[in-house]
Image (cartoon, rainbow, N blue to C red):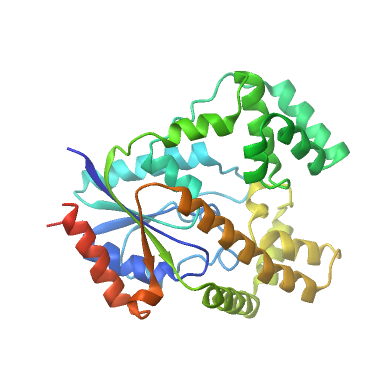
Amino acid sequence: MKKPLVVLTGPTAVGKTKLSIALAKALDGEIISADSMQVYKHMDIGSAKITEKEMDGVPHHLIDVLSPFEEFHIVRFQELAKKAMEEIYNRGKIPVFVGGTGFYIQAITKDIDFTEGEEDKKYREELSRLAAEKGNEFLHEMLREVDKKSAEEIHANNVKRVIRALEFYKENGFPISQHNEEQKQNETPYNLAYFVLNAPRELLYERIDRRVDEMMENGLVEEVQKLKDMGCRREMTSMQGLGYKEILSFLDGEIPLDEAVRVLKRDPRHFAKRQLTWFRRESDVIWVDKDKFAFDDEKILEYMLSVCRERKIIE
């Protein structure tokens, strides 16, 4: 019998947090964060991290578990998430994944195999040197030549993922995008309810702007300054998140604060578009358009629970 698994995702700022608490309580579940930034300690404001008060007694996993100096990637996420799932199942509860990182969610729902071959450290160092000397775009162009699909999906500034894709091609002789595509065809090993929360674009953009204003009021600049004082640098994985790299550019004197805020409001819009594109390509998803429920969280919750009952996830 397949084990139950529930996912609540959607674009940034759509309003997943409050609904996720109500859903987890109704399912007698525990939440696992599918967010690439909330995993880090000391990074609360820029990651829009859930507070203890907002958790309202619901256990949360993969939040505040790593230092900003540690790397966090898909393989580490999958490892930590599976460990948390095992503990949750042993307690007779249901794991509820909440967050907007689609690739992380897919790693669990499709149980993707990320077994890595022998590391070619020399090649990795050579690629890192090329990026430092000739720029991220140069490396991205190298990827485009061997794996056009990955080059379209991975941003040039995400150097670690660009390097990983080039390494994969060198090791295996075929593109990582082909490998991922094959893995995506896997059937889910879980009794799955995969909800994608969505809202009209204008509303989403409004919420993003408001969230950025709140972050600034709550002390985002001071938070990034503290991280900088701790020794955090922009090339670190933790500093690649939206909100952190822009404020670092301001603190390093590269751009004025109003420009940093402008970029901070613009980039999450692009990110939200990319998230929606990702979820549209996923099989098994159940779209939950907030406007169709008159933006009433109780109605949305009732609908999600009816799906869970239908799928025998709950009685």
- Quarter of the picture holding the C terminus: bottom left
Q: State which quarter of the image contains the N terminus.
A: top left
Q: Could you tell me if residue 42 is visible in this image?
A: no
Q: Is residue 89 left or right of residue 77?
A: left
Question: Residue 219, how many percent across, how many down?
Answer: 64, 75
Residue lying farthest to the left in this orientation? 315
Q: Please give the name of the residue rendered at 58% of the width and 56% of the height, measured from the top-left corner.
A: 274
Q: Which is nearer the eye, 93 or 315?
A: 315
Task: Give the mark count.
Answer: 0
Residue 145, x across and y down, in percent: 74, 31
Image x and y of residue 11, in percent: 50, 63
Q: Which image quarter: residue 53?
A: bottom left
Question: Closest to the observer: 158 or 86?
Answer: 158
Q: Residue 6 placed where, x, y %?
A: 30, 53
Q: Does 120 sit above or below residue 228?
A: above
Residue at image coords 43%, 48%: 282
Task: Decide if residue 263 is in sight here.
Answer: yes
Quarter of the figure with residue 107: top left
Look at 30% across and 56% down and name the residue there.
30
